[in-house]
Amino acid sequence: MKKRIVVGTIAVVLVVVLIVVWRPTGLGFKPNIDAESAVLLDMDTGDIWVDINGDQPMPPASVSKLMTEMIVLDQISSGMIRWEDRVPISAYASKMGGTSLSLKRGEFYSIRELFEGIAIYSANDATVALAEYMAGSEDSFVLMMNDKARNLGLSSNTIFTNATGLSGKDLGFTAPNMHISGETMMTARDTAKLAAALIYHHPDILNISSRTQMHLKNKGLYVSNSNFMLPAMGGIYAYEGTDGLKTGHNNRAGYCIAGSAQRDGHRLIAVVMGAKTYESRFEGAAKLFDYGFFRSLQSGDRVKHMMKPLRTRN
């Protein structure tokens, strides 16, 4: 009997020692994220559970398109525009560099097609085309973006200077004169708030952002989602419960993601900005989700969770 007690005690001590030494994220220890800034937001309460330089202004690259998506869906909801409306492609929109659908001047596409091109593929030409359609010019649309940011209570550290998130260098000769000059900047905290507001007011966005592909029928073009955390994408970065939301990358911003995942009715928003590799942004978001979902468990369930693999990724 004493021998069993001693063996049991030793086993418990070893488990405790291993937990303390390893400090695994999935067992409730705050994660170390290999990025310039990161935030984990609990959508049930609005609380920030992890904040690493969350108020630091950062170039967001295409993650800034979350605001473009918000304004499009606001106008759809209000009846100002309709999904089936046909949008003309301007010469300026057709010249957008970076990720694009190769839209040509004079072509017409539905708002739905262009919106899917933004939400799934992050197409810059589709983004500018919608901005011009809704506001008359990208410049006027940028004013709408900043007004919406203030209405949502985002900080003054978040400012939009174009609809796409492209840097001035990436825009090159196509960059027009804007009322608001400089570079688009967002904080990780504001990005999480924006993502949460987008999902709260327009939950159908997740039906689009969770899709792995879109098909542009006029061109016979299939393009893939760059969010490798979506379960349907498969691979090593797929994370159970992920259904969005936006990735971004350019040389100035590094690799960024505003991720959304839900398990057992509990939704979390994970933001990683300024990661050095596309792998580290997904790994960072997975660490944040691991921490958040473990923290949301009841104490009894946490013990059961310790007996399972820390990650549920494929």
Image: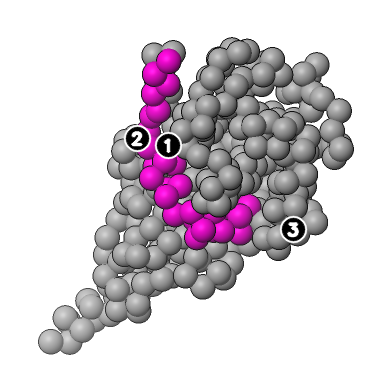
Q: Is residue 284 visible?
A: no
In magenta stretch: residue 231: no
Residue situated in front as seen by the camera: 84 or 144? 84
2 left or right of 74 in image: left
> Which element is circle 3 on?
helix
**Rendered residue at 79%/28% (across/down):** 168
Task: Give the overall secondary structure of the magenta segment.
Answer: helix
Task: Say which residue appears at 51% left-offset and 32% top-offset.
Answer: 85
Which is nearer the N-term, disc 1 or disc 2?
Answer: 1
Amino acid type, mark 3:
Arg
Q: Is residue 193 magenta?
A: yes
| First along the sequence among labels 2 and 3 | 3
- In percent of width and height, residue 8 lies at 23, 78
Label 2 to label 3: alpha-carbon separation: 35 Å
Magenta part of the chain: 191-218
Q: Is residue 20 above or below residue 105?
A: below
Tell me the kind of residue under disc 1.
Phe
Q: Quadrant of residue 170?
A: top right
Q: Nearer the viewer, residue 101 or 60?
A: 101
- Residue underneath mark 2: 233
Cβ–Cβ below 8 Å for labels 1 and 2?
A: yes
Percent across and percent down for residue 108 are 54, 19
**To which residue does mark 1 refer?**
228
Q: Which residue is mark 3?
A: 150
The reply to whether residue 88 is visible in this rendering is yes
Left or right: 241 in relation to 87:
left
> Which residue appears at 60% of the width and 22% of the height?
88
- Give the Cα separation between the discs numbered 3 and 1: 31 Å
Q: Which mark is residue 15?
A: none
> In this view of the protein, which residue sits in the foreground, 263 or 314?
263
